[in-house]
Amino acid sequence: DGGITQSPKYLFRKEGQNVTLSCEQNLNHDAMYWYRQDPGQGLRLIYYSQIVNDFQKGDIAEGYSVSREKKESFPLTVTSAQKNPTAFYLCASSIEGQDAYGYTFGSGTRLTVV
Amino acid sequence: AQKVTQAQTEISVVEKEDVTLDCVYETRDTTYYLFWYKQPPSGELVFLIRRNSFDEQNEISGRYSWNFQKSTSSFNFTITASQVVDSAVYFCALFNQAGTALIFGKGTTLSVSS
């Protein structure tokens, strides 16, 4: 079945460490997105990519980095510059140019700083 | 400016009660799309409905119904005869042609008790 796989489901990070969250899709979608979810804050856009080897900052990109070397993969790195990384991270995808049809979401990664 | 407001942070009902989740949006575009997603405790967002700005017909799907009113910029969601399995966070979202990604409201947490 086609879908989006995020791993790991739970991730613990020590302060000062970089961590990478994985997002893989087999839907042949061109566009991919990373959202951050905090209690009571809804979903906020971190980065998005509409095509391989290209990506754009969203509303809260500071302290994060991404890459898009393959169509099916869009990993997110939470760097030590992100001061408050504890949150739930959701990856999504859509057919490029057809955001009007909505997104398919992964099941998320919960990141906790210890 | 584009914005989605879900004024109800939390709603608690008893099984079999009807419940309406409010969504108010802001956009200057004449062409836009509205969505509702459900986020169960597992975390993955599940697509419920998509509506374009030119279609103001209300929609009913089983126990779910949606009321779209451009005059009040609202896209409200009603669950009839609620069930415990309806307990989740519900998000309203907006996409317009000038945008780059879906814009989400902060979500409404619905708790249905037996």
Image: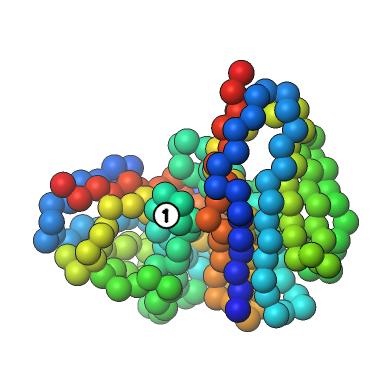
Q: Position of residue B6 (x, y in %)?
A: 61, 55
**In this rendering, would B89 be left or right of A68?**
right
Instruction: Name which residue type carries label 1.
Output: Gln
Q: Position of residue A70 (x, y in %)?
A: 38, 67
Residue on which disc 1 sits: A37
- Up/down of A81 relative to B10, above or below: below
Q: Chain of mark 1?
A: A
Q: In the picture, residue A75 is in which quadrant?
A: bottom left
- Residue shown at 67%/66% (left/top)? B25
Q: Nearer the viewer, residue B61 or B78?
A: B78
Total number of numbered labels? 1
**In this rendering, would A31 be left or right of A36?**
right
Q: Is residue A99 visible?
A: no
- Up/down of B35 relative to A51, above or below: above
| SS under mark 1 | strand
Q: In the picture, residue B73 is in which quadrant?
A: bottom right
- Up/down of B92 relative to A114, above or below: below
Q: Position of residue A50 (x, y in %)?
A: 49, 74
Q: Position of residue B100 (x, y in %)?
A: 55, 75
- Residue shown at 55%/70% (left/top)? B101
- Residue shown at 42%/62% (left/top)? A34
For disc 1, the neighbor class at 10 Å (few under 14, some 14 to 19, many from 20) is: some
Q: In the picture, residue A94 is in which quadrant?
A: bottom right
Q: Nearer the viewer, residue A72 or A45?
A: A45
